[in-house]
Image (cartoon, rainbow, N blue to C red):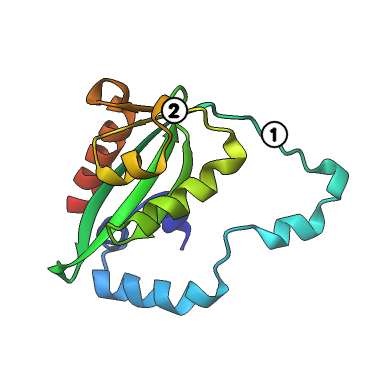
Amino acid sequence: MDRSLKASGVRDTARVLRISPATVLRALRQKEAALASVNTALLRTMAPDEILVDMQQAGEAEMDEMWSFVGQKGNQRWLWHAIDHHTGAVLAYVFGRRKDEGFLQRKALLEPFGITRYFTDGWGAYARHVEAEQHTVGKAHTQKIERQHLTLRTRIKR
């Protein structure tokens, strides 16, 4: 589990530990019920006034989608991903099918960030659900997110 927190994949973990990927997956499935997105044990030990939350409005976001598959290519899954245009920090992501609903879920997750400009490719969901004055289409402004997706694809292949 410690290696998964350090962004190591299943195959990477299996190679380092010299065990099979199936063994790693089995261990992850056993721990799945106990996993949470918030470190509740740490929060219980801290006083509320010790916790500092720094929320900033992003302003501009790059959005893109990339596909992969589960088991066979007919079983496609899409990663809907949005990053801060200036810092490259991940703002929101959604996994699902390539339908407008996936985009709308991600757009709802972006609302607290106060996005005023969206940089995307030319996929139709963006034109249907983003105001034209807030939307810029083209590769010139989506280089960071395209680079992240290429890096992710390369790591998945390993």
Above or below 43: residue 116: above
Residue in the picture at 42% in, 57% down? 4
Report x, y in % for residue 79.
32, 52
In which quarter of the view is residue 99 placed? bottom left
**Helix, strand or loop at mark 1:** loop
**Does residue 23 appear to the left or right of 46 in the view shown?**
left
Q: CA distance from mark 1 to mark 2?
A: 25 Å
Above or below 153: residue 39: below
Between 73 and 117, the residue placed more toward the observer is 117
Above or below 113: residue 10: below
**Does residue 61 appear to the left or right of 25 in the view shown?**
right
**Disc marking residue 134:** 2
Report x, y in % for residue 25.
33, 72
**Does residue 95 appear to the left or right of 154 in the view shown?**
right
Q: Residues within 10 Å of mark 1 (few under 14, many from 20)?
A: few
Q: Earlier in the sequence, mark 1 or mark 2?
A: 1
**Does residue 84 appear to the left or right of 55 in the view shown?**
left
Residue in the picture at 34% in, 55% down? 100
In which quarter of the view is residue 37 placed? bottom right
Residue in the picture at 58% in, 36% down? 113
Between 29 and 63, the residue placed more toward the observer is 63
Q: Residues within 10 Å of mark 2 (few under 14, many from 20)?
A: few
The residue pinned by badge 1 equals: 54
The kind of residue on which mark 2 rests is Gln
Q: Examine the rendering and report whether any part of residue 158 can be seen.
A: no
Residue in the picture at 76% in, 38% down? 52
Q: Examine the rendering and report whether any part of residue 132 can be seen.
A: yes
Report x, y in % for residue 10.
30, 61
Q: Total of numbered circles in the picture?
A: 2
